[in-house]
Image (spheres, rainbow, N blue to C red):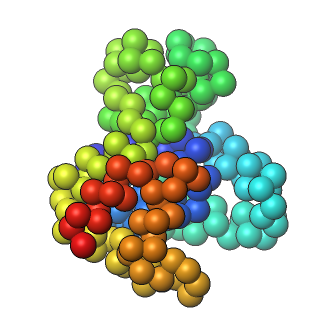
Amino acid sequence: MLPVFLDTCVLLKPYLCDTVLTVAEGGLCRPLWSTDVLEELKRNLVKRGATEAQVGHRVRRMTEFFPDAEVVDYRQLIAAMTNDPKDRHVVAAAVRGGAELIVTENLKDFRPEDVHPHGIEVAHQDEFLLDLLDLSPGTVLGCLARQVSRYRREPRTVSDLLDVLGSAGHGCPRFAATCREFL
């Protein structure tokens, strides 16, 4: 299973986060994150209007479902990283966690020359989900169906979920369009 380090920007968007974690649950990847990423996630969720209880619930659920996702003992590697200073903790944790891929929206903060020496690639969330769809379309589409089956409110169909994922707010237009070709 492909070990992927998820940057905060991927975890912050609720439906994107749910999609990525649902495909992980489906066995297509192994999610990784760090204490720093979870703290950044919490701060940003509160800034967006979530209550402390909602934030706590969301992070608790993530860590309950993926108890091995949190990378520890990476901080001593931060100083050796050469990427954008505000995201050096991401590369350090990805290295410590054995990630092969960092999934992010902020590609400019993770230049190839900064991550390739560590055996790590970087992919935008749209590209990452497209690659998984290419690898196993049936599994990905099944995961999307399972995802919407858990919702009590909209989006209640895969098509509605693809509308959300394809929007500018979630940043996966090519993934959404390609999924529609399978429906």
8 versus 53 height, above or below: above
Residue located at (78% from left, 70% from top) = 53
Quarter of the image that includes the C terminus: bottom left
Q: From the top left corner, tell me how far across and down residue 71 is, in percent.
A: 51, 42
**What is the tally of numbered marks visible in this picture?**
0
Residue nearest the viewer, comparing 138 with 39: 138
**Residue 111 vertical position relative to residue 171 in the rendered view, above or below:** above
Would residue 169 appear left or right of 133 to someone viewing this image? right
Name the residue located 45 percent from the left edge and 18 percent from the top edge.
Answer: 111
On the image, the x and y values in percent for residue 20 come to 42, 57
Q: From the viewer's perspective, is residue 109 above or below residue 157?
A: above
Q: What residue appears at the point 68 percent right and 70 percent down from the top-left corner?
A: 57
The one nearer the camera, 30 or 173, is: 173
User: Left or right: 74 with respect to 162?
Assistant: right
Q: Specify whether residue 183 is in view.
A: yes
Left or right of 146, for residue 50: right
Asked whether residue 99 appears in the rendered view, the answer is: no
- Say which residue appears at 26% left-offset and 47% top-offset: 131
Q: Position of residue 2 (x, y in %)?
A: 28, 46
